[in-house]
Image (spheres, helix red, strand yellow):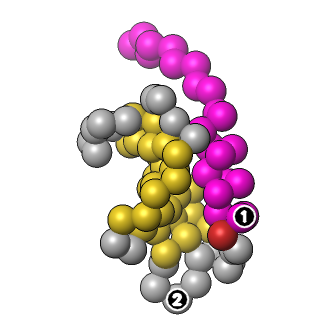
Amino acid sequence: MNIKKENLKTIVEDDMFEIHILSKVFKGYIFKKFLKGSMFDLVEQREINIALTEDQLIQTAAEMLRSTYTFKPQTI
C-alpha cells in the first residue's frame, strides 16, 4: 500500500486500485476507488460526513482496498 499527496487530495494505492480521498467543503470526506491507471473506471464511492483523523482516513482507504467484488452479467 502506497500513500501520496497531490494538491488537495490523498491517494492510497495498491497494485490494482487507487483510492482518492477528497475533503468536502464544510466537513467530511469523499473516497473514490478507481481501477489503477484509469480515471474513468470508478469502482466504488463513499461519502463520510464527519471529521476523521489522518489515521482513520488511511484505515478507511485500506478497508476499501481489501474489498472484493463479484460481477454477474445481467440477462434480459
Q: In the rendered view, would you say 21 is above or below 26?
A: above
* Residue that appears at 46% across and 57% down: 4
Which element is circle 1 on? helix
Q: Which residue type does callout 1 highlight?
A: Gln
- For label 2, the residue is 26
Q: Earlier in the sequence, mark 2 or mark 1?
A: 2
Q: CA distance from mark 2 to mark 1?
A: 18 Å
Res 56 label: 1
Q: Which residue type does callout 2 highlight?
A: Phe
Look at the image and tell me whether residue 2 can be seen. Answer: yes
Image location of residue 62, percent across then percent down: 65, 46
Q: In the rendered view, would you say 68 is above or below 36?
A: above
Disc 2 + disc 1, Cβ < 8 Å:
no
Dot 1 surroundings within 10 Å: few (below 14), some, or many (20 or more)? Answer: few
Image location of residue 8, percent across then percent down: 39, 74
Q: Quadrant of residue 63?
A: top right
